[in-house]
Image: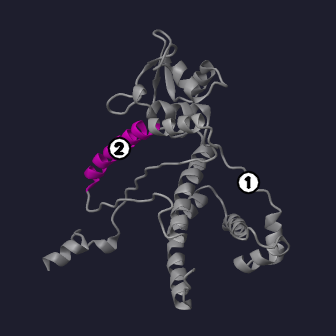
Amino acid sequence: MTSQISPEGLKAEQQALVAVLEQLLSPLAKLCLAKGISIQTAEEVMRRAYVQAATEDCKGHNPARLTSRISTMTGLTRREVARLQAQDAPTQPLTRSLATDVLTYWASQSEYVNKKGLPIRIPRTGEAPSFEALAASVTRDVHPKSILSDMVRLGLVTHNEKNDTVAVVEAIYVPKADWPQMVGFIGANVGDHLQASVENVLHGGGQHFEQSLLADELSTESLQAAKSMITAQWRELMTQIGPQLQALMDQDKAFKREQNQQLRIGLYSFMSAMPSAQLDPLGQSSEESNEEN
């Protein structure tokens, strides 16, 4: 039996959600302003998202009354709903390529990294660990030489022709020279993170792992030390869980299971000044000040 929410309880939930919406939308507004995207354009995207969400929620209902039902749910007119339904969804920027897949695989396999979790220099050809074997583990549809050329072009690796070895320039890939790909990562990474949080809230939690740790009362010097700790933790996660996930994929293939699911695992950190409300004029936390009094 589904529990009924009282009008008062529903109103309280709505107020809480509206308060959180500003926190979620403010960074997006900042990004849109930086790139000259008007409020009208952002509103159009929001309207389309509302219609899409309502459409998914109406699966199984009478198709003949779909537009009317969506109109009632969203507050948009039937004409507006029909207009938005007729629009094609915008093409999402690509975030994956063979080059990035090979780099990810390189950084996640224990035989391709050192004790610190950093990718080692490897011979271009030969048995594993080699670039040739590495590329073949990701795909056999493209020749390793072509993949290497693209990775060198992108500045992901260097090829020492004298001793015929390949080395990673930077283990953590950030597409600084490719704005569409950078913003595409926002959609993919933050989008999946937000989707996981929303599904947990709507369905009582437990559907997806979604946790965070907050540490305050730190100095700027401590933040730099923490950044190094977080990077090391990510490398350890990559090298430990990467081979285990590959083993699961190999097992699925061996048992001829339908391989139609995907998993995204992320780690993020955000560093900022503590909210002023938590500090007294002397720079102490409010809890410390209360304890002294």
Question: Quick check: 254 left or right of 274?
Answer: right
Residue 166 image offset from top left, x and y in percent: 48, 20
Q: Quadrant of residue 138?
A: top right
Q: How is the image coloured?
A: one colour
Q: Image quadrant of residue 251?
A: top right
Indicate the secondary structure of the residue bearing disc 1: loop
Instruction: Please determine whether, in this image, residue 10 is positioned above or below residue 30.
Output: below
Give the secondary structure at mark 2. Answer: helix
**Residue 239 x/y as whole percent:** 41, 36
Tag 2 residue:
233
Tally of marks: 2
Image quadrant where residue 233 sits:
top left
Q: Is residue 171 visible?
A: no
Q: Main secondary structure of the magenta part?
A: helix
Q: Position of residue 9 (x, y in %)?
A: 51, 87
Q: 138 or 253, which is in the foreground?
A: 253
Looking at the rendered image, the quarter that the N terminus falls into is bottom right
Residue for badge 1: 90
Q: CA distance from mark 1 to mark 2?
A: 36 Å
Magenta-drawn segment: 219-242
Q: Residue furthest front?
A: 255
Residue 226 belongs to magenta span = yes
Q: Dot 1, crowdedness within 10 Å: few (<14), some or many (≥20)?
A: few
220 lies above or below 138: below
Work out which quarter of the rendered image holds the C terminus and state it.
bottom left
> Furthest residue to the top?
162
Percent x, y for residue 101?
Answer: 56, 34
Asked whether the beta carbons under mark 1 and mark 2 sit within 8 Å of each other, the answer is no
Q: Which residue is painted at 42% across and 21% down in the image?
A: 121
263 up-or-down from 12: above or below: above
